[in-house]
């Protein structure tokens, strides 16, 4: 039986679900037309494809066209110790696999939070690798598989140059990835939307729910800032093509958190 994929959040399911628990959660939403499903076969018939864009040396963006579900991108990091995928997209086909094979394949997949679990098992099977999600979010794994592994604690050392950091906030297990080799050795932080790059790209923000505009508690924001503090990074790459803080990214997080908390406290007093 073909695996169903939710058209709103992009999560692939085991079995024949009627509803999508991820979309029923208050951090997401059910589409205006009600619950709708598709499959990889149907997406191929509708001529979806994945576009590859080199955004800096050894960092490649993979994004589905036309836009699908949340429309996030995956980021492929090439290192001497292997190739690693940060976050994932729902669509995968032979052409996608061939392009990634040309880049050296995949040695592991690491996902920031449940909204980007997408078709992670399909990807792990195709590249014969494992996919890692934080144990705090394991209840949101909708297609259990032996290749899906959970990790615990505040950080996961992947290689000498890559560390996944559990920051919390959006989800209890929400994570970011630190790569020392990015930005010409100055370091980059891949944030998904754990830390959200806003249109004024010198700033970021934080939310419990982005589509439903539910703010994040002060203590959660302080935890996020504290968790990334030990790491040096110059640049942030978020979940979408233009979500980039090109420089002074660490300072951007600090002052953005200060601004958020200042406005929150002012509104509380008023």
Image: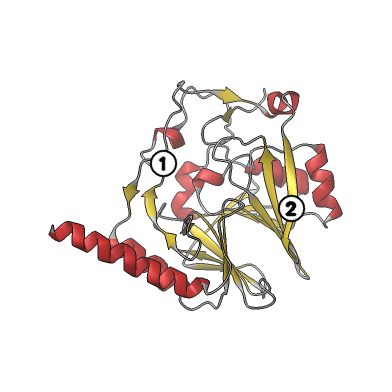
The quadrant of the rendering that contains the C terminus is bottom left
Q: Residues within 10 Å of mark 2 (few under 14, many from 20)?
A: few
Image color mode: secondary structure
The quadrant of the rendering that contains the N terminus is top right
**Pointer 2: what residue?**
53
Residue at image position (34%, 61%) is 220
**Pointer 1: what residue?**
211
Residue at image position (82%, 48%) is 99
Residue at image position (39%, 71%) is 255
Q: Residues within 10 Å of mark 1 (few under 14, many from 20)?
A: few
View extreme (left): residue: 270
Q: Secondary structure at mark 1?
A: loop
Q: Is residue 68 left or right of residue 20?
A: right
Residue 126 against residue 185 in the figure, above or below: above
Please name whichever residue, 190 or 123, is drawn nearer the observer in this view of the structure: 190
View extreme (front): residue: 200
Where residue 13 appears, as percent x and y from the top left, is 57, 32
Task: Please count the marks in the image.
Answer: 2
Say which quarter of the image contains residue 21: top left
Where residue 253 appears, as percent x and y from the top left, is 44, 69
Verify CB contact (< 8 Å) between mark 1 and mark 2. Answer: no
Q: Is residue 264 left or right of residue 71?
A: left
Where residue 161 appears, as percent x and y from the top left, is 66, 74
Say which quarter of the image contains residue 183: bottom right
C-alpha separation, residue under disc 1 versus residue under disc 2:
27 Å
Please name whichever residue, 88 or 56, is drawn nearer the observer in this view of the structure: 56
Q: Which mark is residue 267?
A: none
Q: Is residue 6 left or right of residue 251?
A: right
Mark 1 vs mark 2: which is more N-terminal? 2
Residue at image position (60%, 69%) is 188
Q: Secondary structure at mark 2?
A: strand
């Amino acid at each position: 039986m073909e695996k169903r994929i939710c058209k709103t959040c992009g999560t692939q399911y085991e079995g024949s679900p009627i509803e999508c628990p991820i979309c029923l959660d208050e951090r997401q939403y059910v589409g205006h037309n009600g619950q709708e499903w598709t499959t990889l076969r149907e997406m191929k018939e509708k001529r979806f494809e994945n576009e590859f864009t080199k955004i800096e040396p050894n960092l490649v963006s993979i994004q589905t066209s036309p836009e699908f579900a949340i429309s996030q991108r995956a980021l492929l990091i090439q290192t001497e110790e292997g190739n690693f995928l940060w976050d994932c997209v729902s669509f995968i086909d032979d052409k996608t696999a061939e392009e990634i094979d040309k880049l050296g394949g995949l040695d592991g997949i690491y996902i920031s939070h449940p909204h980007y679990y997408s078709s992670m098992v399909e990807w792990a099977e195709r590249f014969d690798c494992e996919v890692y999600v934080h144990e705090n979010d394991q209840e949101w794994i909708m297609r259990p598989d032996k290749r899906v592994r959970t990790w615990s604690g505040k950080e996961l050392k992947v290689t000498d140059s890559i560390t996944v950091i559990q920051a919390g906030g959006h989800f209890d297990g929400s994570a970011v990835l630190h790569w020392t080799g990015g930005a010409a050795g100055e370091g980059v932080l891949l944030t998904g939307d754990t830390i959200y790059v806003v249109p004024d790209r010198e700033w970021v923000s934080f939310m419990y729910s982005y589509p439903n505009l539910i703010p994040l508690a002060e203590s959660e924001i302080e935890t996020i800032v504290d968790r990334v503090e030990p790491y040096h990074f110059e640049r942030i790459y978020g979940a979408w093509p233009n979500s980039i803080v090109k420089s002074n990214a660490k300072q951007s997080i600090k002052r953005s958190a200060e601004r958020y908390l200042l406005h929150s406290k002012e509104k509380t007093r008023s």
